[in-house]
Image (cartoon, rainbow, N blue to C red):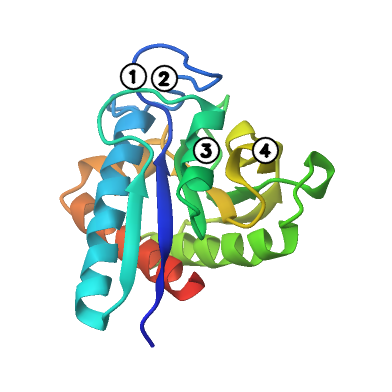
Amino acid sequence: MAKHGTVVIDPGHGGSSVVGGSSPNNATSPSGVKEKNITLAMAFLIREELRRFADSDGHSLNIILTRETDVNVGLAARGNVAKNNNANLFLSIHCNASENHTARGTETLISPVSDGNTNYAKDKVFAQAIQNAVFNTIKMHDANARDRGVKDQVLAALRRSALGPSVRAGMVELEFIDRPDVDALLNKEPSATAVRRDLSKAIAAALVTAL
């Protein structure tokens, strides 16, 4: 069945200075690949895959990126893109890092009820679909993948005041890129291009299914 709707993809971070509470970059891989560049590259791939789905299956998709260059966008402004375009789905793409560089895994974050999220139940279903798509894809390429699950977290970009009342929204932390094995998986190994492509296909499929 053909799907119709607006999907907003938010590549985390960007630029060189803090804007509206959004830091220019958080995580960096051992080989020097910055989170802000991975998130933008993944957003482009996801958009490309969504367009493929639309062309092949007759979906009518309006796909919007909150940024398309190395610029930073304020946290509330990112959410506002969904509100201003009456979006059905909002997905923010990020990468993780830990203080001791030992953590691994994929997790997807949603705004808690305690922060005024009136769409919590629907957000959780949407976030679980994204979580499954990313974790299962990484597990397919790496037996050490870890499912960290869907978690509640107060995040300015996911506040209902920014997003509006009805859009389903979540933030996926793809993996902990500060680890050498993840750096190899996503950036350094010859297969990294295929891993990123598989991730984008899985995420795009989950987005289309969620519409």
Q: Amino acid at mark 4?
A: Ser
Q: Nearer the viewer, mark 2 or mark 3?
A: 3
Q: Is residue 29 visible?
A: no
User: Where in the figure is residue 37, as x and y percent of width and height?
Assistant: 29, 32
- Tell me which residue sits at (39%, 88%) in the image: 1
Residue beneath disc 1: 15
User: Where in the figure is residue 184, as x and y percent of width and height?
Assistant: 29, 43
Q: Earlier in the sequence, mark 4 or mark 2?
A: 2
Alpha carbons under labels 2 and 1: distance apart: 5 Å
Residue sitting nearer the eye, 4 or 90:
4
Alpha carbons under labels 4 and 2: distance apart: 23 Å
Q: Nearer the viewer, mark 4 or mark 2?
A: 4
Kindly indicate whether the residue at mark 1 contacts the one at mark 2 (C-beta within 8 angstroms): yes
- Mark 1 residue element: loop
Q: Is residue 211 above or below residue 39?
A: below
Alpha carbons under labels 3 and 1: distance apart: 19 Å
Q: Residue furthest bottom?
A: 1
Q: Amino acid at mark 3?
A: Asn
Residue sitting nearer the eye, 113 or 193:
113
Q: Nearer the viewer, mark 4 or mark 1?
A: 4
Residue beneath disc 2: 24
- Mark 4 residue element: helix
- Mark 2 residue element: loop
146 to the left or right of 177: right
Residue beneath disc 4: 161
Q: Amino acid at mark 1?
A: Gly
Q: Is residue 164 visible?
A: yes
Return the mark for residue 172.
none
Q: Earlier in the sequence, mark 4 or mark 1?
A: 1
- Tell me which residue sits at (50%, 53%) in the image: 86
- Mark 3 residue element: helix
10 Å crowding of disc 3: few (<14), some (14-19), many (20+): many
